[in-house]
Amino acid sequence: MILTPLQLQEFRQNGFLILRNFLEEKRCEAILDVAKVHLKHRIEPIETELGYNAKSLEYRRDITDYSSTKKQSQVRRLRQVYDRDILFKEWMENEKIRPILKQVLDDEVVITTAHHNSIMTKMPSPYSETAWHQDRRYWSYTDDNLVSVWLALGEENSQNGVLEFIPKSHTMNFLPEQFGEKDYFLEDNPLNMSLIETKVSSNLKAGDVVLFHCKLLHRANRNSTQKPKISFVYTVKGKKTEAIEGSRSAQYKEILLI
């Protein structure tokens, strides 16, 4: 499967693209079943809600030990999922999506296990909102040719925290004062307000895939339902894009998809 010229143009222009009904529902259910077991038993490495909120930008950029220290807090994500289960590995190496990733990267495709490589949860909570940010802010690479692959494992909507994007923001240059603590894009900054008004989102169903650029501003509202929202995200880069030596990005293995 490959993208049409219009789809490729949409990705390059807006910084994201939705692929509807990409993965079969049965495979999504199987992935979700395994994820729920790992979440239930809190199989490390995990990141908890309290652990996430307490971490500085420097910690997220530099630390490689993700074992959780907040044992009583809700699990925010399962980390390092590539090596957790064959179902996770098979999705990340999915042959159907490889030609698409090669198109958007315009290079050979490499999975980086250093970033994302996670089962993401959004638990019912007034504190589960995610602020506007660019994923690239704590990654260390020679360029920005990185794309994240988000797989919905169930319904994702405005009530349970669907992804929101600011189209074209991956091509924009920002001033340091437009970002606050931990490099979150400030919603109350007058320079940002009109841009945030252009935000878009789209409901997702199990099997839908979202591709988005590492510099695209995105966020997710809190989960105000009674059920957890569980998703799968991993990141790929072009082969010519190299992790900077000595950084956290260089501490984990990479998988070339031929």
Image (tube, grey):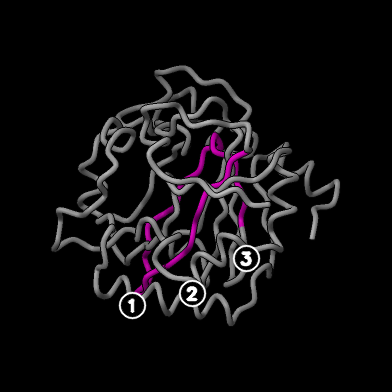
As helix, strand or loop, the secondary structure at mark 2 comes to helix
Q: Which residues are magenta?
A: 210-238
Mark 2 and mark 1: Cα distance apart in space: 10 Å
Mark 3 and mark 1: Cα distance apart in space: 22 Å
| Amino acid residing under circle 2 | Ile
Residue shown at 57% from the left, 65% from the top: 91
Looking at the image, which is closer to me, 153 or 83? 83
| Amino acid residing under circle 3 | Asp
Mark 3 vs mark 1, foreground winner is 1
Residue shown at 42% from the left, 36% from the top: 249
Q: Which residue is mark 3?
A: 208
- Locate residue 174, reporting x and y percent: 51, 21
- Kindly tell me whether residue 96 is visible in this rendering: yes
Q: Is residue 229 left or right of residue 151?
A: left
Q: Is residue 172 left or right of residue 180?
A: right
Q: Which residue is mark 1?
A: 37
Question: Badge 3: few (under 14), some or many (20 or more) residues near its Cα, within 10 Å?
Answer: many
